Structures are given as C-alpha cells and as structure tokens.
Image (cartoon, helix red, strand yellow):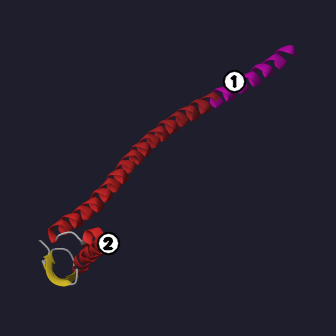
Amino acid sequence: MASAKNYTEVLIDGKVFTVSGFESEEYLQKIASYLNHKIMECTANDSYRKQSADTRSILLALNISDDYFKAKMKVDSFESDMDNRDKEMYDLKHDLISTQIKYENTQKALDKAREENQALQLQIVKLEAEMKTKKK
C-alpha cells in the first residue's frame, strides 16, 4: 500500500510554494531549507547577482549538482570501503576457521600421543617389574 501524498507550504527565496510528495512534511521542509541555503550561498557572490535569472538558475543547479556528485562520491567510497572490509572480514573468518581446524587436529594428535605415551609408560613399568622378578 502506497503512502499518502503530503502537501506542505515552504518558503523558498522569499516566496511561498506548495510542494507535494510521498515524503514527510519535515523532509520537504528540509529540502526547501537546503535550497534556501544554496540560494543564499550563491547570492553572496557579486558576480552571481549580476547574472540574468536564467544564468543564476543554471549556476544554482550546477552548485546543487556539485553537492550531489560530491556526496555520491563519498557514498561510493564508503561502499567500496565496506566491501573491502567485508572481504577482509570474510578472509579473517576463513583464516580463523582454518586455524581452529588445525588446532583441533593438533589437539587430537597430542591427545593420541599422550595416550600412546601412557601405554608405553605402563609397558615400561610392566617390563621393569618382569625384569625384577626374573632377577630374583
């Protein structure tokens, strides 16, 4: 089920506009606030104010596009970092599992060697006892 369309009035560059969207009213206000900030940023520049309305619109759009592409590059970089860290984590987990298997195999071999050692020690004691009985 789709969300209801929201309508809200926003103030952009001193003019009231009714905007609509499926996003929340707070989000629409946030977008208008961002746009006002970019307009103020641009109008702070004397050369911008001297341009025609069409040129100012294009320059404003270029500034907003610049923000978008810089943000997208950051997101792409973060996603790449995440992918690299996921791969590194996978490799570390694989190494951990391999090490655990080696440890378990070594532990089994050690346990077997201890059992063999005990059996041999017991055999030594029996042989020593037999030798003592034969000497007597």
Above or below for 30 versus 93 = below
Per the rendered image, the range of residues in magenta is 114-136
Specify the quadrant that holds the N terminus.
bottom left
- The residue at the point 68 percent across, 27 percent down is 117
Q: Are marks 1 and 2 in contact (CB under 8 Å)?
A: no
Q: Residues within 10 Å of mark 2 (few under 14, many from 20)?
A: few
Instruction: State the residue at coordinates (22%, 64%).
Output: 59
Residue 41: give its label.
Answer: 2
Residue 65 position, x and y percent, is 24, 60
Residue 31, position as x, y percentages in the image: 25, 74
The amino acid pointed to by label 1 is Leu
Q: Which structural element holds mark 2?
A: helix
| Disc 1 to disc 2, C-alpha distance | 88 Å
Q: Position of residue 22 (x, y in %)?
A: 16, 74
Label 1: which residue?
120
Which residue is at the far right?
136
Q: Name the N-terminal-most of marks 1 and 2.
A: 2
**Which residue: 65% across, 31% down?**
114
- In reply to whether residue 124 is colored magenta, the answer given is yes
Nearer the observer: mark 1 or 2; the answer is 2
Q: Amino acid at mark 2?
A: Glu
- Is 57 magenta? The answer is no
Taking depth in this image into account, of 117 and 58 the one nearest to the observer is: 58
Residue 38, horizontal then vertical, whole percent: 28, 71
Left or right placement of residue 93 versus residue 135 in this view: left
Q: Quadrant of the C terminus?
A: top right
Q: Which image quadrant for residue 37?
A: bottom left
* In the rendered image, the vertical position of residue 125 relative to residue 73, given as above or below: above
Q: Is residue 89 left or right of residue 48?
A: right
User: Which secondary structure, mark 1?
Assistant: helix
Could you tell me what secondary structure mostly forms the magenta stretch? Answer: helix
